[in-house]
């Protein structure tokens, strides 16, 4: 019995434009520190500015950046893998043979219908058409995939 090796066809991440708000928060944090450290004499105001800047940087820049870097969709010859979560905690694997419909929606939304279970919805995907085309190319001919 010969085993077929699984090969990666595509690995797709979200666009870096989703980090625009996070980068603005990091800039605001740096601007607050820069302004306060040169102008304020009182220690308590300086320390409170440090706390506010650290809070902005951690909650509005670091956490969204980690989430962005841990999200990807990987299409292999036998399955579709979606990894999401703050540290990649949520992984969804769907066998290509299990997918029976592919629908492109508005706003770069991709809905994958599964035979056994609820559909898998991928939102804000930068290359939704590419994933749909690759799924159609990899799926067996008699599976009934629709656009």
Image (cartoon, grey):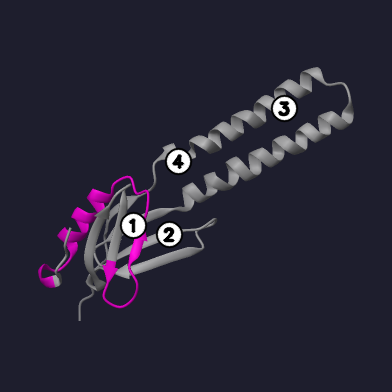
Instruction: Give x and y (percent) for residue 129.
Output: 23, 49
Can you identify the residue that label 1 sits on?
A: 74
Q: Quadrant of residue 1?
A: bottom left
Check disc 4 and report its element: helix, strand or loop.
Answer: helix
Residue most toward the left? 141
Q: CA distance from mark 2 to mark 1?
A: 8 Å
Q: Quadrant of the C terminus?
A: bottom left
Stretch in magenta: 113-142
Please determine whether, in this image, residue 42 is positioned above or below residue 75.
above
Q: CA distance from mark 1 to mark 3?
A: 40 Å
Can you identify the residue that label 3 sits on?
A: 33
Q: CA distance from mark 4 to mark 1?
A: 19 Å
Residue 134 in the magenta stretch? The answer is: yes
Marks 3 & 2, CB-CB < 8 Å contact: no
Label 4 crowd bin: few (<14), some (14–19), many (20+), radius 10 Å: few
Marks 4 & 1, CB-CB < 8 Å contact: no
| Mark identifier at residue 18 | 4
Write the residue at 60% across / 29% down: 27
Please determine whether, in this image, residue 29 is positioned above or below residue 99.
above
Q: Nearer the viewer, mark 1 or mark 3?
A: 3
Specify which label sits upstream in the sequence, 4 or 1.
Answer: 4
Instruction: Give x and y (percent) for residue 5.
Output: 25, 67
């Amino acid at each position: 019995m010969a085993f077929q090796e699984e090969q990666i066809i595509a690995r797709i991440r979200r666009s870096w434009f989703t980090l625009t708000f996070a980068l603005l928060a990091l800039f605001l944090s740096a601007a607050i520190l820069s302004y306060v450290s040169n102008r304020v004499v009182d220690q308590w105001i300086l320390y409170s500015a440090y706390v506010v800047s650290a809070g902005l940087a951690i909650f509005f820049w670091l956490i969204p950046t980690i989430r962005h870097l841990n999200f990807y969709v990987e299409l292999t010859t036998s399955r579709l893998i979606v990894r999401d979560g703050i540290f990649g905690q949520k992984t969804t694997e769907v066998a290509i043979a299990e997918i029976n419909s592919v629908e492109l929606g508005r706003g770069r939304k991709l809905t994958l219908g599964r035979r056994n279970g609820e559909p898998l919805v991928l939102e804000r995907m930068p290359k939704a058409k590419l994933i749909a085309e690759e799924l159609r190319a990899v799926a067996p001919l008699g599976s009934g995939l629709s656009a």
